[in-house]
Amino acid sequence: MPLTLSELQPLSGRFSGELLNEIAAHGVIMDFAEGTEILREGQYIKLIPIVLKGLVKVFASFEEKELLLYYIEPSQSCVMTFSAGLNNSPSRIFAITEEDSTLLLLPVEKMNSWIKHYPQINELFYQQYNLRYSELLDTINSLLFNRMDQRLYSYLLEKSKLKGEKILQLKHKQIAGELGTVREVITRVIKRLEQEGKVKQLPDGIEVF
């Protein structure tokens, strides 16, 4: 059943009416619960996601460790998924919903045609490329030059901003997994940040100041 234009309203300012009609005819909208893996490493891409609502986090694996690369916010997509889909190559990343999310899924088989006929698609993914490239450079810089306390505090600040919450319901093991370290390190560093007045550990999470 085709989508309605009202369902695509979050994209109305980005795409032309003609392209929205194409997306309505061929796209699919799906809801995903928090913590759902929507893309596996090594998977071949058949559908390219655009987040309509919610938040998705993207990871890469390095020597059996996972590292958080970036978040996909509403009206954004994943340029690495786009690239893998167009090149018919396996995904080098995996993605998990950070919260309950609604995604628009676009068929890879239509993308080459849309890229040629609708410049807005190119603009979207050029913007995503620039954004992700900058974020990846920041991640590399943080890994190479920042101490773990700086990395952890920046991570907590960003997550608090993205989720719009001062108290984050996070376990030390989860944080360690996203920062590519071990739980014991996170526990020690959070205690240090708490002594510095930057965070406060509560029964139901971590408050960020």
Image (tube, rainbow, N blue to C red):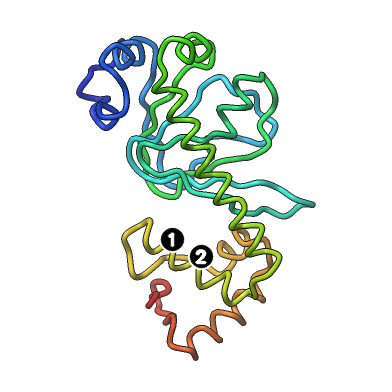
Which quadrant would residue 184 be assigned to in this image? Answer: bottom right
Q: Is residue 119 left or right of residue 155?
A: left
Q: CA distance from mark 1 to mark 2?
A: 6 Å
**Residue 176 image offset from top left, x and y in percent:** 62, 65
**Residue 151 image offset from top left, x and y in percent:** 58, 69
Q: Amino acid at mark 1?
A: Lys
Label 1: few (<14), some (14–19) or many (≥20) C-alpha neighbours in 10 Å: some
Question: For mark 2, what is the residue?
Answer: 155
Q: Is residue 18 left or right of residue 64?
A: left
At mark 2, the secondary structure is helix
Q: In the displayed structure, would residue 104 be above or below residue 142?
A: above
Q: In the displayed structure, would residue 91 be above or below residue 47?
A: below
- Residue that sits furthest to the right in the current view: 63
- Residue that sits furthest to the left in the current view: 6
Specify the quadrant that holds the C terminus: bottom left
Q: Is residue 124 left or right of residue 172?
A: left
Residue at image position (61%, 57%) is 139
Question: For mark 1, what is the residue?
Answer: 159
Tag 1 and tag 2, C-beta contact below 8 Å: yes
Q: Amino acid at mark 2?
A: Tyr
At mark 1, the secondary structure is helix
Residue at image position (59%, 34%) is 80
**Residue 37 image offset from top left, x and y in percent:** 54, 40
Q: Is residue 145 left or right of residue 111?
A: right
Specify the quadrant that holds the N terminus: top left
**Quick one: 10 or 121, which is closer to the camera?**
121
